[in-house]
Each structure stands twice: as C-alpha cells, then as structure tokens.
Image (tube, rainbow, N blue to C red):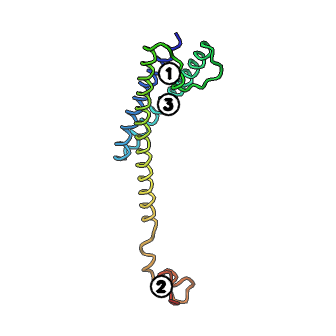
C-alpha cells in the first residue's frame, strides 16, 4: 500500500512542478516587458506552490522511510533511485521509473527557466544601474568656469594627460 501512496505523491509533485514551470515561463515575458505588478502576483503564486512542493517532498520522504522500515531496511535515504531499486513488483517499478524520468525532465526545464529569468533580472538591474549613473553625472560640471587658483582646478583633465610621459 505504501508504494501506491508514494506513486500518488510523486504524481502530485509532477503536477505541481508543471504548474511551477508554467509560472516561471510566464515570468520571462513579464520581466522582458517590465510588468512589475504582474510579476509580483506570479511570484506570490510561486511561493505558495513552493511551500506545497516542500510539504509533498516531506511526505514522500516519510512514506519512503516507512516503506524501507516495512521491508526491513534500516538506514536508507529518501532518494527515489534507491526506492526504485528496492521495488520487486514490475508494474510499480515501471511506473516509478516513468515518474522519476518525468520529474527529472520537468525539474531540468524549471532550472533552465529559472536561470534564464535570473539572467534577465540581472541584466535589467545592470541597465538600471547604468541609467541611474548617467542621470547622476552633472553634464554642466565640466563646462562651469572655475578660477585657476581654486583647488581642484583642472584635476579632471590631468587624469587624461600625463605630463611625465
């Protein structure tokens, strides 16, 4: 019975990760188009799904530990590959192998989408930093007359020309 519960939990996790992937993919366009409010809404949805994913993972780990205890294995981690190796029923083993493969696939896609979104956000922040830097520079600063005896006169130009050379 516990293997069926584990398989059901894995199917729930797979469905949830697909939902997370959809959100992550939709965030890409929001980042590019600078839709901050929509991005915030999607991020909040994503946080709720991540909390649910953590809960499902704890439940799967507990079920796996209980299964290993029931079949007489003492210390086993909750790694799905170990669980699959221990299963003797061919039908359930095939089902678990398929779920394992699908989970790896969707998690790989989720990681790629997340990495891309992080790069886009970094580029946006770099651009904003650059733009703010341009706005903060005073374009009139170099054109203002200063008396030659004032301290600092010509210092900006001395950096460009080395008289010792």
Q: Residues within 10 Å of mark 3 (few under 14, many from 20)?
A: some
Mark 2 or mark 1: name the one nearer the start of the chain.
1
The relative height of residue 154 versus residue 101 in the rendered view (above or below) is below
| Quadrant housing residue 102 | top left
Where disc 1 sits, the SS reads helix
Residue 50, numbered label: 3
Q: Residue furthest top?
A: 1
Q: Are marks 2 and 3 in contact (CB under 8 Å)?
A: no
Please report the residue visible at 57 percent of the width from the left and 23 percent of the height from the top.
Answer: 61
Q: Residues within 10 Å of mark 2 (few under 14, many from 20)?
A: few
Q: CA distance from mark 2 to mark 1?
A: 71 Å
Q: CA distance from mark 2 to mark 3?
A: 57 Å
Q: Residue furthest right?
A: 74
Q: Nearer the viewer, mark 2 or mark 1?
A: 1
Report x, y in % for residue 120.
Answer: 40, 49
Q: CA distance from mark 3 to mark 1?
A: 25 Å
Judging by the rendered image, the residue that carries numbered circle 1 is: 84
The relative height of residue 106 versus residue 97 in the rendered view (above or below) is below
Report x, y in % for residue 10.
Answer: 47, 21
Q: Are marks 2 and 1 in contact (CB under 8 Å)?
A: no
Where disc 2 sits, the SS reads loop
Report x, y in % for residue 130.
Answer: 43, 61
Judging by the rendered image, the residue that carries numbered circle 2 is: 161
| Quadrant housing residue 72 | top right
Please report the residue visible at 53 percent of the width from the left and 90 percent of the height from the top.
Answer: 164
């Amino acid at each position: 019975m516990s293997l069926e519960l584990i398989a059901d939990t894995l199917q729930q996790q797979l469905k949830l990760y697909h939902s997370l992937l959809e959100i992550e993919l939709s965030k890409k366009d929001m980042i590019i188009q600078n839709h901050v409010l929509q991005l915030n809404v999607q991020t909040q949805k994503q946080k709720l799904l991540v909390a649910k994913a953590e809960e499902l993972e704890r439940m799967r780990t507990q079920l796996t530990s209980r299964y290993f205890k029931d079949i007489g294995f003492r210390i086993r981690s909750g790694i799905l590959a170990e669980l699959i190796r221990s299963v003797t029923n061919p039908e359930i083993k095939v089902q678990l192998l398929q779920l394992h493969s699908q989970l790896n696939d969707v998690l790989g896609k989720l990681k790629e989408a997340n990495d891309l979104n992080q790069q886009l956000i970094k580029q946006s922040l770099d651009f904003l930093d650059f733009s703010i830097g341009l706005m903060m520079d005073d374009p009139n600063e170099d054109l203002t007359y200063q008396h030659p005896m004032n301290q600092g006169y010509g210092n900006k130009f001395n950096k460009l020309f080395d008289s010792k050379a």
